[in-house]
Image (tube, rainbow, N blue to C red):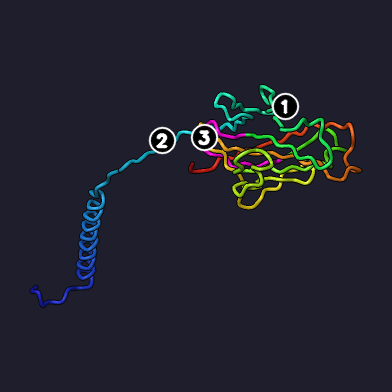
Amino acid sequence: MDATTPLNPEAQRKQDRARKRKAILAGGVVLGLGAAVTLAAWSDDVFANGTFTTGSFELQGSTTADAGDFKNYDGPTGTPADTASLSFTMAPLDIAPGDVNYAPFWLRVNGTQDALITIPSVSGTTPALNTQLSYKIYTGAPTCDAAGVASAAAKIAYSKNSIDGAAADISAGNQVTAPQAPSSVPLCITVTAVADQTLLPQGASTTITWRFTGTSVNGT
């Protein structure tokens, strides 16, 4: 039998099966080579880190601006319980209708960030008198008196028409930022009695407490 002699059916089936096995084996060789190439890929790492340290923050006040006079003054519930005693220009017990009283106060931050100042509450101990008193807090006044608050440099930062326990109104653009020590920002607190003598009770006394809150300013 030569190459031109037709195969019988059985021989033809054997020849076809042999070809398929060779094709499958050849395909297996190709797949095996492909897997070997993938496993040979390069791999490497790069690492980076950063160290973060928290800052410190303590709002302090002073009635004299002397470096040694600044204290935390954390209020009646603080530890220790301590509130700054303001020095008004007139005797607070002698106020009369229309009188204006002036007291300087300085703020700073003992820490690593400046503080944006708000006054969330101003309270007094005698409601009948509280409603007849108003206050303004100036920034930029060269002196804490009538001439100082009337100067062009003085700006009203906070105010309220009565001592009602509520937060102080903040004048747009004049909100105070307390700097980091040793710098400080001076304020001038004024308290004005109602001018109508029929409204101002005689012989009354009230203790007014301003609560200053500082919120750290990011990036300072």
Tell me if label 2 and label 1 are in contact, CB under 8 Å: no
Residue at 76% in and 40% down: 100
Residue hosting label 3? 183
Give amino acid for label 3.
Ser
Q: Does the magenta stretch include residue 110?
A: yes
Residue 211 seen anywhere in this rendered image of the structure: yes
User: Between marks 2 and 3, how big is the CA–CA gap?
Assistant: 29 Å
Give the left or right position of residue 71, taking residue 195 as reference: left
- Expressed as whole percent of the image width and height from the top left, the position of residue 167 reads 73, 43
Whole-number angstrom distance, CA of label 2 to CA of label 1: 38 Å
Instruction: Residue 76: give its label.
Output: 1
Could you say which is closer to the camera, residue 88 or residue 8?
88
> Label 3: few (<14), some or many (≥20) within 10 Å?
some
The magenta segment: 106-120
Q: Describe the element under mark 3 as helix, strand or loop.
A: loop
Residue nearest the observer in this picture, 38 or 84: 84
Mark 1 or 3, which is nearer the eye?
3
Q: Which residue lies furthest to the top in this view?
A: 80
Q: Nearer the viewer, residue 57 or 90?
A: 90
Measuring from the top left, give residue 16's x and y in whole percent: 22, 68
Residue labelled with disc 2: 51
* First along the sequence among labels 1 and 3: 1
| 192 over 75 or under it: above or below | below
